[in-house]
Image (spheres, grey):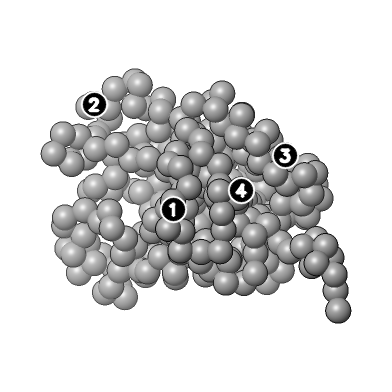
Amino acid sequence: MPTTNASNTARRTLLLTGASRGIGHATVIRFSSAGWRVITCSRHPFPEQCPWDAGPEDHIQVDLSDLADTERAIRDIRSRLEGGELHALVNNAAISPKAEGGGRLGTIETDGDTWAKVFRVNFMAPVMLARGLIEELKAAKGSVVNVTSIAGSRVHPFAGSAYATSKAALAALTREMAHDFGRVGVRVNAIAPGEINTSILSPGTDKIVEEQIPLQRLGTPDEVAKIIYVLCTETSSYVNGAEIHINGGQHV
C-alpha cells in the first residue's frame, strides 16, 4: 500500500484560469474526475458551494488585466506548488467587451483602454503564466493549452474586434511557445472552440447553427474539456504547436 505522501506526490496538478463557468467549469470536472489536483484562478473569490473536490487553498483570486497582480499570483502559485511539478496549464480566461445593449464592438468603436485590457487578459496573461511557471512545467514535462476561438480566423457576428484579434494573436503565440518551450520538454497547443452551448450565447446563434455548422448543433462544454484533457496527457505526447478546431465543421 502506498503511503499518503507517496500518493500525493504522484498526483498530477492542473492550473486553470477562467474556471467558474462554461468550458472552464467542465474542464475542472473532467480533470478532477480523473484524480488531478486542480488549482483555479479567477477574479472572483472561491465559491462557497464549489461543485468539485477543492478548497480555498487551491484557488487564487487575481485580476489578469493587471500585470502586477498577475505577477503576484504567479508567486502565490509557485509557493502553493512548493517547488513541485505543474503537469498542465490551461489558459482559458478571456474577456469580450460588448457595446451598449450587448452589440458587437468593431475596430472603430473600441477605445484604447479596452484594446489594452483585452490583450492583457487574453494574450499577455497566458505567456506570463507559462514563463513564470516554466521550472514547474519543465519538472513535469508538462503541457500548456491556450484556448483561442473560431473568431480568431474570421469576422464573427458577435465577437468584438479586440477579442477576435487577441485570439488570433494567441494562436500565433502558441506556435512561438511550442518552438521555445518544446526545447525544454513542455508541449504547447491550442484549441479553437466554435459555438458552444454555455450561458453566454448571443441572440442569433440559432441562425449560425442552421447556416454554418454541418453537424447542425451546438457543441457542449464537456466536448471541449475532453480535448483539453487529451492534450494534457500522454495520448498527445507528440502533438506540439497545433490548434485544434472544435466547432462541428463550422470552419470548413
Q: Circle 1 sits on which residue?
A: 48
Residue 238 appearing in the image: no
Give whichever of discs 3 and 1 has the lower sequence position.
Answer: 1
**Which residue sits furthest left?**
101
| Residue 219 position by quadrant | bottom left
Q: Nearer the viewer, residue 141 or 42?
A: 42
Label 3, label 4: how far apart the Cα atoms are: 11 Å
Are circles 3 and 2 on residues that touch, CB within 8 Å? no
| Placement of the C terminus among the 4 image quadrants | bottom left
Give whichever of discs 3 and 4 has the lower sequence position.
Answer: 4
User: Left or right of 206: which side holds 75?
Assistant: right
178 in relation to 23, above or below: above
Give whichever of discs 2 and 4 has the lower sequence position.
Answer: 4
Assess disc 4: are there few (<14), some (14-19) or many (≥20) residues with their C-alpha within 10 Å of its C-alpha.
few
**Residue 198 picture location, percent across and down:** 31, 60
Residue 7 appearing in the image: yes
Q: Nearer the viewer, residue 160 or 51?
A: 51
**Residue 4 picture location, percent across and down:** 80, 67
Label 3, label 1: how far apart the Cα atoms are: 23 Å
Q: Name which residue lies at 18% across and 64% down.
A: 206
- The amino acid beneath tag 1 is Glu
3 vs 4, front mark: 4
User: Left or right of 166: which side holds 3?
Assistant: right
Are circles 3 and 4 on residues that touch, CB within 8 Å? no
Give whichever of discs 2 and 1 has the lower sequence position.
Answer: 1
Q: Secondary structure at mark 2?
A: loop
Q: Name which residue lies at 20% across and 69% down.
A: 210
157 in relation to 66, above or below: below
Q: Circle 2 sits on which residue?
A: 108
- The amino acid beneath tag 3 is Ser
